[in-house]
Amino acid sequence: MNMVITNRQSGTNVYEVAEGIYRINTPVVMDAGPGGFSFNQYLILDDEPLLFHTGPRKMFPLVREAVASIIPVEQLRYVGFSHLEADECGSLNEWLAVAPQSSPLCGTVAALVSINDMADRLPHALADGELLSLGKHSVRWFDTPHLPHAWECGFLMEEKTRTLLCGDLFTQPGNDHPAITESDILGPSEAFRQQMDYFSHTKNVRAMLEKLAAAKPTTLACMHGSAWRGDGAKLLRDLADELSL
Ligand SMILES: [Fe+2]
Ligand SMILES: [Fe+2]
């Protein structure tokens, strides 16, 4: 599939980055911080469709319009996210309202600390290493406390396409990226980390990145910037090296 613009004004667009996995991208200009930036959500199309990241609450109409260009929004079954932040789950309750059969999908810490209370329906909480079938696709949750930030942080690995939904890892600034790239994203994301210091300085980085590398992803579905295709295990280990310097 080619890139489809779903909103002319905002430039919100949709592109299939792996089989049945759609990147929804909205470019923005921020007054403070990086200037040009982008927010991505990922829709896994299957018997039980999953949206990973809701996008910021104020972006809900744009993300809803983009999802609706692929499936009727009420068909969503899971609304997942990595950790508690506006771009991760700001419109969680809006999604639960428009998709009445959907549940929040998160790790056990997020459920215990926040989502059991904040969400309008109880979450489906996944333990570290737990697998959830969506039909042809299945996703495995990995706890990564404080990597890159937030105690409740974790990521989902889609096993059929070997796509790691890697949230804020490899965050690239700018608002004009290809939907998917095979060129370097570590350099730009490391330059951005130096500038914004959004990593938590946890001492357990290497073990957690090694856990993700062992899943051998071939697509990294980043929340900010391009998705990436290549030897994901190597790139995760390269990131561990950078973070240990
Ligand atoms: Fe974050
Ligand atoms: Fe983010």
Image (cartoon, helix red, strand yellow):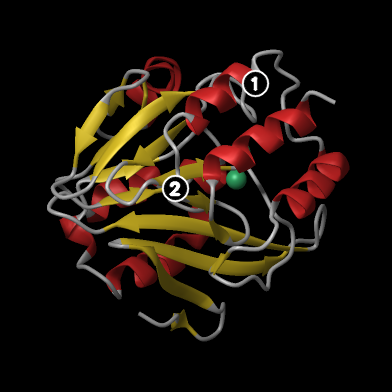
Instruction: Name the outermost residue toward the bottom.
Output: 8
Answer above or below: position of 140 versus 201: below
Numbered badge on residue 206: 1
Along the viewing direction, whichever of 222 and 36 lies nearer the viewer: 222
The residue that mark 2 highlights is: 53
Q: What's the residue at 42%, 33% (across, down)?
A: 215
Mark closest to the chain's N terminus, 2 or 1: 2
Count of picture labels: 2
Examine the rendering and report whether any part of residue 105 can be seen: no
Taking the image as shown, residue 129 lies to the left or right of residue 131, namely: right
- Per the image, label 2 sits on a secondary structure element best described as loop
Badge 2 crowding class, 10 Å Cα cut-off, few under 14, some 14 to 19, many 20 or more, is many
Query: Percent from the top left, x then y, of residue 211?
Result: 49, 23
Q: In which quarter of the image is the C terminus?
A: top right
The kind of residue tagged 1 is Arg
- Per the image, label 1 sits on a secondary structure element best described as helix
Find out if the beta carbon at label 2 lies less than 8 Å from the nearest ligand 2 atom: yes
Numbered badge on residue 116: none
The kind of residue tagged 2 is His
Query: Quadrant of the rendered structure where residue 168 is?
Result: top right
Look at discs 2 and 1 and give the one toward the viewer: 1
